[in-house]
Image (cartoon, rainbow, N blue to C red):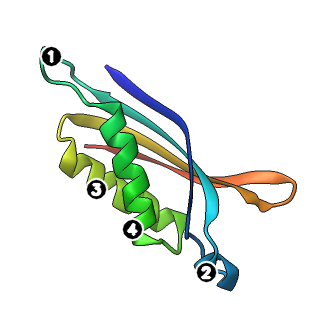
């Protein structure tokens, strides 16, 4: 089974530049989770989305890469059914002419 969370959008402190450490900026996160579904064994996408947002807002990461690593470990710990995970974090407003981001695949 595949759980899809696309374009999860919120503001958080992320980045290494001075203004990024003081002003929240918009991020967009995509998450694809593969797991073996069975009766009464499922992953609640609302819980996953909430955990991603809460973790990002609490940790106030400097690097997107660090955020991806921590999110991967955190999601696996709280949702042990996850077999593979694809996470993408985008910063749509940091450059005037494009959206930038980083993506990581996890195999557990």
Answer left or right for 23 relative to 85: right
Residue located 37% across and 60% down the image: 55
- The quadrant in which residue 58 appears is bottom left
- Whether residue 16 is visible here, answered yes or no, is no
Q: Earlier in the sequence, mark 1 or mark 2?
A: 2
Task: Give whichever of discs 1 and 3 has the lower sequence position.
Answer: 1
Distance from Cα at disc 2 to Cα at disc 3: 26 Å
Q: Secondary structure at mark 4?
A: helix
Q: Is residue 106 visible?
A: yes
Q: Earlier in the sequence, mark 4 or mark 2?
A: 2
Vertical comparison of 38 with 81: above or below: above
Foreground of the two, 47 or 98? 47
* Residue at x 40%, y 42% (from the top left corner): 49
Give the labeled residue for mark 4.
58
- Please give the residue where the numbered disc 3 appears in the rendered image: 73
Q: Which residue is mark 1?
A: 38
Give the x, y percent position of residue 90. 62, 52
Identify which residue is drawn at 47% across, 72% down.
60
């Amino acid at each position: 089974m595949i759980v899809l969370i696309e374009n999860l959008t919120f503001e958080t402190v992320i980045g290494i530049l001075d203004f990024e450490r003081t002003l929240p900026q918009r991020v967009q996160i995509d998450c694809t989770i593969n797991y073996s579904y069975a009766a009464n064994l499922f992953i609640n996408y609302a819980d996953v989305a909430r955990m991603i947002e809460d973790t990002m807002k609490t940790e106030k990461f400097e690097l997107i890469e660090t955020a991806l690593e921590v999110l991967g470990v955190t999601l696996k710990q709280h949702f042990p059914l996850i077999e593979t995970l694809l996470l993408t974090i985008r910063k749509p407003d940091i450059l005037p002419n494009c959206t930038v981001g980083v993506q990581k695949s996890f195999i557990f």
